[in-house]
Image: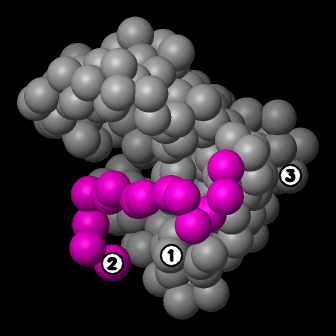
Amino acid sequence: MLEPDEPTQHSAKVRFLDLLGKREASDEFWDELSQRYRNYNHWAQDNLLQLSEKDIWMNWLLPDYPRELIEPVADELTLAFKERKGRTIPAAGAIEVLVDLKQRGYKLGLVSNSLSSLDIPQSLKAFGWKDFFDSVILSSAVKYRKPAPDIFWEATRSMNVDPAHCAYLGNRIS
């Protein structure tokens, strides 16, 4: 979950602007970018699809910027854009649940509707959780979003597990 954290938020905004070759941005710039993100997010949820980070930035969020500027840094832009809201922290008790499930012999997969190809892998490494998961499936990589069945089928295929023998535990009822 995201926790507001001034140093993380400030660093992310500076990094984001550096990637764009800008020193500063107006409140209107951030407001417009946030509105464009909401528009994309509604489209993605309505269609249960996830575009690549490059396509999101070039077609939805910063379509007026040169492609040659955006394309090579799209993944870093996505991470900085997320981090401008705060830092990722694990939910209380999460490590205990992961340890218990692994000790019981469960195969664990992580399925996320993440725009970023970087944030989940970085968080798993930072939390020391990488080895708990047999599979990590990100919508940014497979191009489908939950609750589309395709993203779950991809997880079961990657772990060589019959979907009938799987359970899904999520943070949202939908």
Quadrant assignment for the N terminus? top left
Give the vertical position of 85 relative to 76 (above or below). below
The residues colored magenta run 161-174
Q: Which mark is residue 42?
A: none
Q: Secondary structure at mark 1?
A: loop
- Three-letter amino acid code of the residue under disc 1: Pro
At which x and y percent is residue 31? 35, 64
The chief SS type of the magenta part is loop
Q: Secondary structure at mark 2?
A: loop
The answer to whether mark 2 and mark 3 are in CB contact below 8 A is: no
Residue designated by label 1: 147
The residue sitting at 35% across, 19% down in the picture is 103
At which x and y percent is residue 6? 17, 25
Rounded to the nearest whole Å, what is the CA distance between mark 1 and mark 2?
7 Å
Ranked by sequence position, the earlier of labels 1 and 2 is 1
Ranked by sequence position, the earlier of labels 2 and 3 is 3
At which x and y percent is residue 120? 50, 34
Residue designated by label 3: 67
Residue designated by label 2: 174
Q: Quadrant of residue 149?
A: bottom right
The residue sitting at 17% across, 34% down in the picture is 91
* Whether residue 95 is visible: yes
- Outermost residue, right side: 68
The residue sitting at 52% across, 28% down in the picture is 133
Between disc 2 and disc 3, the foreground one is 2
- Three-letter amino acid code of the residue under disc 2: Ser
Rounded to the nearest whole Å, what is the CA distance between mark 3 and mark 1?
31 Å
The residue nearer to you, when weighing 45 against 36, is 45
